[in-house]
Image (cartoon, grey):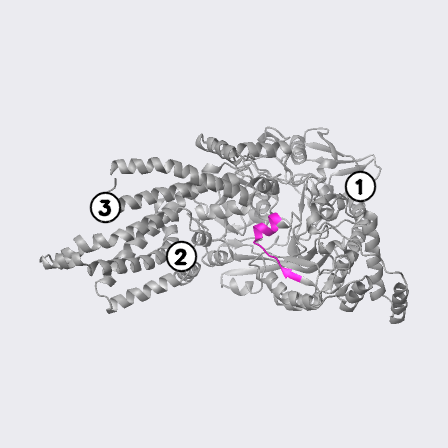
Amino acid sequence: MKKHSKATRLAASLFAVALIASACGGDDEAATDDTTALEEEPAAEPVSYPTLAECADVTYDYTYTPPASAGMTVTYDLNPDAVWEDGSPITAADFKATWEAALNTPGSISTVGYDQITSVEAGSSDKQVVVEFKSVYGPYKGLFGGLLKAASVKNTSDISADFADFIGFSGRPWVMKSWSPSQVVYVPNKNYWGDDKAASEELVIVPMADDDTQVASIKAGEVDFVYPQFYGGIEEAYADPNITLQKEFGGDYEGFYFQQKCGPFANPIFRAAFSKSIDRDALFQQIYVPLGGESPLQCGPIVPGPYCNGDEFANSYDPAGAEALLTENGWTKGADGYWLDPATGEAPDIRWIINTGNTRRENTQAYLIPLLNAAGFKVRADNCDAACYFQQRLPALDYDMAMYISTAPPDPGYLTPSFTCDQIPTAANNNQGQNSQGWCNAEASDLLHNADFEADATKRAELVKSALKLMAADSVMLPLFQFPKAGFWRTDQVGGPVGAELRNYTSFINNHLWTDLNGDGKVVLGAEQWPACLNPVTECANSSWMVWTTINQVMPGAFATTNDGAYVITNLLTGEPTVTIK
Amino acid sequence: MLRYVLRRLAWAVPTLLFITFLVYIALRTGTDPVASYKRVNARATPAKIQQYIDANGLDPNYVRGYFRWLGNFLTFDWPRSIKGSREVWPALKDALANTIRLGIAASAVGIVVGLMLGVFAALRPGGRRDVAVNTAAFVGISVPPYVSAILFQLLFAVYWSRWFGSTLFPTAGVYPPGHTGFDLALMAKHMVLPTFVVAIQIIAVYSRYMRSSLLDVLSSEYMRTARSKGISERRVLFKHGLRNALIPVVTIAALDVGAIVGGLIITENIFSYPGMGMYFLAAFGDGDFPLLMPWMVIIVFSTLMFNLLADISYAWLDPRIRLE
């Protein structure tokens, strides 16, 4: 059952945006005129939006039509010396196996991009790979980042039962020796062809149950390096004469997200008013300045760089505007001071979810909820533990407001699965999709999809920026803070370029270059989270720590990310691939 | 006695089946295994989901589903974990072995020391050593394991390495990072801190049990009779007093040790010790039915067996009790 048409939503959104613009923009006289004009309009009938109980019935009639194109060909020339751990060459067959496995394996988490490929074949030799795309695909550099060894799998149409607890192949400096719930051990890949061979005899990664254990382990010298999530007072917690800290800003950002498929924030007027009632600057002073923050993030779900002007999500705090917006649309305050929905006569109940035990987020709730209550919004904390939060309630869109950290890869292609209409989990798509805000703006979806089909970097950036503006206008989220990434290591136990790749999306990927200083022959890393399984294409790979501790260590790729957030070719290729647009 | 044990063992089978049936229903209704599977494998095809349902006996009819699950379980045709399709037995076996090792070590240290302190205190009730043991016991009971664990880690690892250049006892794991294979000495060294964290609580509790039980026995009439017969105080204490005082304590000990098999969740977590507690936390967090059901069966089985052991010990220690 369709609860509201795209046109209705768009009209309501535009109406809200017009009201916001009238309240914010221009001089006072102009604002007064606009308001007068609005007051003369006959009162609109209250619009009903899907309630939580109706959430499962919401559908969207959005369909994206890709631009007409004859396609694109990307030709990779492989390093003739590139071989797997057993000396067999890395060839086009491995690219083909990777494509087929990512596309066809049931439960594959990353089919985006691979579904645009029509064929992967050997070119002039098996060391040349010719990849044909249906149409132009801008983020092609994000594909083939972790190559499967074709000979390691029997059936590339379904590798979901493979690599449950061991990845035996390697095309990188390390090769996995053993994996268990207690540790993963790597030894140098004797057949590695590159110049950047492993500098120590062994790399061991061990799970750290919590931050206290992590602190104790590195201070006791049992691990050489840890990479904990940043928090206030972390420098003091890890302070030790033999431990050094490097703090950098990468792709991690924290923000508020509003679920709008159903529930109170399905109403764009209410959502806009709520968003305008949050004083991000004051919140930033309260929560993030003690962490070393200087000003709130203004880019939205992306970090500063070529895809953001830096002012898309400029502070929209405007309590008077919020009040005017609601009043103009028939909202009144009840006896308890909460805004009453004209359609139901009730105050919308706003469930704000965070993971219990996260002090920073709990402090944010403690600070903000009373202020929002005083502003007339019936907000309450509705928290659960991390597993429940991230694995159950966020994917199920079972929240109204959420606060969490996302990690943005260098390419903005990740915005497409996260913010387009066709990626909202619904009954029609078997509840698949990663758009866990439930935001559907057809224009923005088209822009993001078009960006994926745009090869020109400048034009692509403009498309993304335009989508961000629509996102801000629709109050999809409020960005808060570009989160620091912090690495701590024992200077008496590990040496080399330890701090060189800490803000890289593929964090500490250069660990093969680290040297053992204390003579135990190994470099030991503490991992804050531990993978339950090692399959590189299924849900197992939906964890940064799984990727950092396993995939990145053994699977070679065509492109790698740099510390500065760019894609560069790896030594697997002899040069930049040739891109031909037909 | 043998007949009693055999009869109890025979009764244990239907009891085990009944309890596992209840557990099966509780897990199915409480965690919704199919929903958990779909959540973890969001893109699973209908065929894969059906395969999972069949392998786990998730029939709409709970009785039929339970017996299907039981059939697979007894023939060792265990379904794989929902996350990554990993075999269940290797992980469960390792977790069980780790927890049993830790549980036995901590129980042995805790119960033996606790009983000795209880006897030591009970022999001079109200005296200085009684006050000292009682005070220590209250402190031990009051300090939660997450506090004592961190204090031990700081003292024996962090500060020890700062003072003497290397740690006295490691803070985490079963072996040092990178170690493979079996090494009793290394394993024992890694178990020292978690063992003592668990043992502190056991010592505190059992010293209280033993003191109280022994004081009761020492003031009983048959003890006065024994003394009036001219039996030496030492013989009165060890032959009559201790044996009778141990009866309630042994019963509790058997049940406590049985419960430890379920895992020492806090201690295992702080020391990154991969036992049954950590196994359960991970499995429950994912709603992983294939991992949870065997864990539950082991817990139920362990509880039943240690109950039986408690009853047998009871009879062995108290000649008035005859097991028929």
Have a look at marks 3 and 1 and say if they share a chain. no
- Work out whether residue A281 can be spotted: yes
Query: Which of the 4 quarters of the picture holds residue A135?
Result: top right
- Which residue position is annotated with label 1? A64
Q: What secondary structure is marked by label 2?
A: loop
Q: Residues within 10 Å of mark 1 (few under 14, many from 20)?
A: few
Mark carried by residue B321: 3
Marks counted in the figure total 3
Q: Residue at x 53, y 56 (%)?
A: A489
Q: In this view, does A40 lie above or below A303?
A: below
Name the foreground residue: A232 vs B28.
B28
Q: Is B224 within the magenta?
A: no
**Amino acid type, residue under disc 1 in the picture:** Tyr
Give the magenta part as a residue range. Answer: A379-392
- Name the residue beneath numbered marker 2: B167
The CA distance from mark 3 to mark 2 is 51 Å
Residue at coordinates 73% horizontally, 52% vertically from top-left?
A: A260
Residue A388 drawn in magenta: yes
- B240 left or right of B28 in image: left
